[in-house]
Image (cartoon, coloured by chain):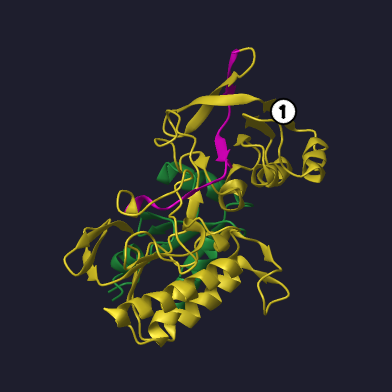
Amino acid sequence: MAAKEVKVYSTPTCPWCRKAKQWLDANKIPYTDFNVAQDHAARDEMVKKSSQTAVPTIFIDGEIVVGFNEPVLKEKLGIK
Amino acid sequence: MTAAVYAARKRLDAVLISKDLGGQPMWAGRIENYMGYQYIEGFELMSKFEEQVKQFPLEQKIGPQAISVIRIDGGFGVTTDGGEKFQAKAVIVASGKRPRQLGVPGEEQFKGKGVTYCSVCDGPVFSGQKVAVIGGGNAALEAIDDMVKIAEHVYVVSVTPFTGDQILVERVRAAGNMTEFLEHEVLSISGDKLVNGIEIRDLKSREKKKLDLSGIFVEIGLSPNSELVKGLAALNAQGEIVVNCRNETDVPGLFAAGDVTNVPEKQIVISAGEGAKAALQAHKYLQRL
C-alpha cells in the first residue's frame, strides 16, 4: 500500500503540535510540516481547506484531523 | 497520572481513562517550581510524566473522555463519550480544569473557527489580522502581550478594569496597537464560515458597538471538569468536587484529586501529590471492603 500523504500545519509554540509530530516520528510516518506562524500562504491554505483556525491541523490524503487525536490518527493511517 | 502510577505500584486492577495526557501543564511555558527541575517546559514535564506512567503495566484508554460516573451495585459505572462502559469498586476523578467559556451566541458555532482558548497555540495563525482578547486578568494580559507583537490590532474586552499585574498592563499599553474596552461585555460573536465580528456593550452607558475582526481569544479563567459526577458527589459553588484531606468525596469509594477539587492552591506539584494521596487512599478503601 502506498504511503499516505501527510501534511501538518503547526505553530512552534503549540504543545499539541509538538506532540503530534513526535507521535508521527515515533510511528515512522513521513510528513511535511508547515509553520503557519511564518508561512502565510500555508496558513491561508489551511484555513481555506479546513474552514477552521486551530492547530495542529493534519491532512491525511486530504482528510482533515484537527488537534492531536491518537485514536483517529491511528485509524486514518492504518496503524494498529 | 500520578494516581495511575501509585495505583499500578499497588498492583491495583486499574484503568486510566483520559481524553489526553498532560492537561493544563501542557500550556505552561517555563516551570521553575516543580521540584527536581530548576527549569522545565510544561510540555517536557508532561512527557516525562507520560513516560513514567507507561513503564507500568496499567491499562490506558487515551482518547475517550469519561462523561459520567454513577453508583451501581458493588461500586461505580463509568461511561465515556464514545459509549464505552467500565465498572470499578473505586473511582478517582482527576479531570482538572478547562478554559471557561463566555456563554454568548456564536461562541459554540465558531469554536476553532476564529474563537480560541489557547493564544499560545493558535495566536500565530492570526498574524497581521485584527483580534480581540476577552478578559482582564494575567492570562488575558499575557495573551494580549503575545498578540500585540503579531496581530495588526488587538481589542481588549473585559467586564472589569485590568486585574492582572501592573507591569503587564504597562507593557501592553506601550505597544500602541491595542484598544481597551474595559467594563464592557461581549454580547455575541458573528461570522460566516469563520468569525468576522463581535458585538460588545458598555456596562455603564449600555451603548453597543460592533468590532470587525477575525480572531477572538477567550481568557476569562477556568472551570472544573466536574460534570461527570454532578448529582452524585457534592460540588462547591465554583463547581469543584468537595473532598476531605483523604481525597474522599461524600460518596464512599469515590475519590477526587487536583484542580477539579476544592483543594486550595492549584499547582502542578500539589495536584501530583494529591493524585498520589488519592490512589493510596483508594487502595486502603479497597482493602477494607
Q: Is residue B73 left or right of residue B24?
A: left
Report the residue at 44% width, 40% height from top. Answer: B111
Image height of B101 relative to B86, above or below? above
Q: Which residue bears the numbered disc 1?
A: B179
The reply to whether residue A14 is in sight is: no
Is residue B133 or residue B260 the one in the foreground? B260
Report the residue at 38% width, 52% height from top. Answer: B234
Q: Residue A49 in magenta?
A: no
Q: Chain of mark 1?
A: B
Residue B171, percent across and down?
81, 42
Magenta range is B206-228
Residue B220, percent across and down?
57, 40
Quarter-wise, where is residue B181 in the image? Answer: top right
The reply to whether residue B118 is in sight is: yes
* Residue type indicated by callout 1: Thr
Instruction: Say which colour chain A has.
Output: green
